[in-house]
Image (spheres, rainbow, N blue to C red):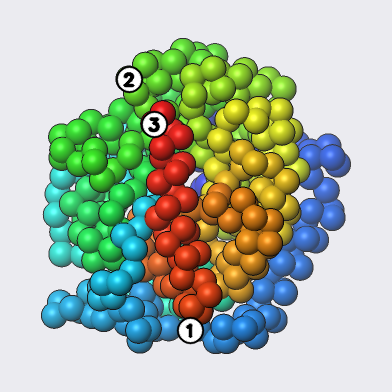
């Protein structure tokens, strides 16, 4: 049986094998300490204790298809989830990916069509042993069993070695079909530079596929560099020269501290080029424990404060470190929060605190992390917390207008 933590430290999605020795030492206390560890453990306990007890009550469903019980969704004739409320704004998803084929480059046709998407963390029964009990009031990955997480890691391994039937469904036509079903007009496609010895060209592979599909109007192609590679600045300049201005950085995968002085040249160049940075933010809780040190919210504070002209999007709203990441966003006008993953009570808090702050409410953007999850799981949460009449303007802003404003800044 694959050990998830060992696997994630040593294979593909997690960067070069050389990084394993770099993260085996004990970090300095200011980087990661027992209080940080206790905070994550307490977050899990509090989340389980409080689930369903917020002002929106219990929201548990039998898989992604079970969301059809909500008033905005139905199942079509093939049993697929569709959004049927034509009054909803056409959403913009600022956090999506395509299928990965790295390292030994298993065959992957990003133009292929399949009967349905098999999400990396699937919740619909015919991919894994049974439908999951989908609780919308907890952080999304808390809904999945150890078996599901083991299947996730085997799929990730296959993306770099021999290919995967699951990954072969993570294609442009399949993403667009799900976007159409969920009333999502556009999506930002975010690759990750992994620092592999070869086969590490997600940016170019996905960009070429989007161009071949002639879907640049719907799929905003981002790029990635590894901030510790010696030629990362040259890579940034080349991407920007070609007109690409949204860069994904992933501290836990790429194994760097966002406030490491060695990579401040990346932020300086981003400011010079007009590049916006989409950070993976916070600890998701299922990555290797050795990588948790990199994603503490305090490590993001200095680059955001020191480079006010750079727009920083904090993906997952800080994941399980949402409380501290929300405070960071509220304190900095160039910081944005992506909504993906948060439970409805936390999302409610984000909206309320941001609205109280005024302009901060315009810096919350919708995200789904497709193909890890069905788009509907993220959409349903936003619709629930914006259902009160007083929040209909918030719904429009969160699902569409804020992201469009960010895209305008990126493309300016």
In front of the other: 108 or 330: 330
**Which residue is at a point 44% across and 15% down the rendered structure image?**
237
Mark 3 or mark 1: whose residue is earlier in sequence: 1
In front of the other: 252 or 315: 315
Q: Is residue 256 left or right of residue 191?
A: right
Q: Position of residue 226 (x, y in %)?
A: 51, 27
Image label count: 3
Residue linked to disc 1: 60
The answer to which quarter of the image holds residue 268 is top right
**Which residue is at a point 43% across and 78% down the rendered structure image?**
132
Q: Position of residue 112 (x, y in %)?
A: 14, 49
In front of the other: 71 or 356: 356
**Does any portion of residue 90 appear in the rendered image?**
yes
Q: Is residue 386 left or right of residue 87?
A: right
Q: Nearer the viewer, mark 3 or mark 1?
A: 3
Tell me the element at label 2: loop
Residue linked to disc 2: 242
Q: Position of residue 227 (x, y in %)?
A: 56, 25
Q: CA distance from mark 1 to mark 2?
A: 45 Å
**Which residue is at a point 58% across and 30% down the rendered structure image?**
310
Crowding around mark 3 (Cα neighbors within 10 Å: few <14, some 14 to 19, many 20+) is some
Compared to residue 367, the image places residue 314 above or below, namely above
Tell me the element at label 3: helix
Crowding around mark 2 (Cα neighbors within 10 Å: few <14, some 14 to 19, many 20+) is few
Compared to residue 371, the image places residue 47 above or below, namely below
Mark 3 or mark 2: whose residue is earlier in sequence: 2
Tell me the element at label 1: strand
In front of the other: 229 or 405: 405
Q: Nearer the viewer, mark 1 or mark 2?
A: 2
Residue linked to disc 3: 411
Q: CA distance from mark 3 to mark 1?
A: 39 Å
């Amino acid at each position: 049986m694959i050990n998830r933590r060992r696997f994630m430290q040593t294979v593909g999605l997690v960067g070069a094998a050389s990084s394993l020795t770099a993260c085996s030492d004990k970090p300095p206390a200011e980087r990661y300490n027992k209080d940080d560890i206790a905070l994550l453990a307490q977050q899990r306990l509090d989340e389980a204790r409080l689930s369903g007890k917020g002002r929106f009550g219990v929201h548990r469903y039998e898989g992604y298809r079970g969301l059809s019980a909500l008033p905005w969704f139905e199942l079509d004739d093939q049993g697929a989830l569709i959004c049927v409320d034509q009054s909803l704004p056409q959403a913009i998803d600022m956090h999506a990916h395509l299928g990965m084929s790295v390292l030994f480059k298993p065959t992957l046709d990003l133009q292929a069509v399949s009967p349905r998407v098999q999400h990396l963390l699937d919740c619909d029964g015919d991919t894994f042993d049974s439908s999951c009990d989908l609780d919308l009031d907890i952080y999304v990955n808390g809904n999945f069993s150890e078996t599901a997480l083991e299947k996730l890691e085997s799929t990730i391994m296959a993306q770099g070695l021999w290919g995967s039937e699951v990954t072969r469904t993570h294609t442009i036509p399949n993403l667009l079909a799900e976007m159409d079903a969920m009333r999502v007009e556009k999506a930002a496609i975010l690759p990750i530079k992994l620092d592999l010895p070869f086969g590490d060209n997600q940016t170019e592979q996905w960009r070429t596929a989007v161009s071949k599909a002639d879907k640049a109007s719907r799929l905003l192609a981002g790029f990635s560099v590894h901030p510790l590679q010696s030629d990362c600045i040259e890579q940034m300049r080349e991407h920007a020269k070609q007109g690409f201005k949204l860069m994904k950085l992933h501290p836990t995968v790429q194994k760097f501290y966002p406030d490491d002085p060695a990579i401040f040249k990346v932020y300086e160049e981003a400011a010079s080029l007009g590049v916006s940075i989409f950070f993976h933010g916070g600890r998701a809780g299922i990555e290797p424990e050795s990588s948790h040190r990199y994603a503490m919210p305090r490590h993001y504070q200095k680059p955001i404060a020191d480079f006010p002209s750079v727009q920083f999007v904090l993906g997952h709203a800080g994941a399980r470190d949402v409380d501290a990441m929300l405070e960071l966003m509220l304190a900095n006008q160039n910081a944005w929060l992506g909504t993906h993953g948060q439970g409805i009570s936390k999302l409610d808090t984000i909206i309320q605190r941001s609205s109280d702050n005024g302009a901060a409410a315009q810096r919350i953007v919708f995200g789904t992390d497709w193909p890890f999850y069905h788009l509907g799981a993220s959409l349903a949460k936003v619709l629930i917390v914006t259902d009160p009449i007083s929040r209909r303007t918030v719904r429009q802003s969160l699902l569409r207008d804020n992201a469009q404003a960010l895209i305008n800044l990126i493309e300016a």
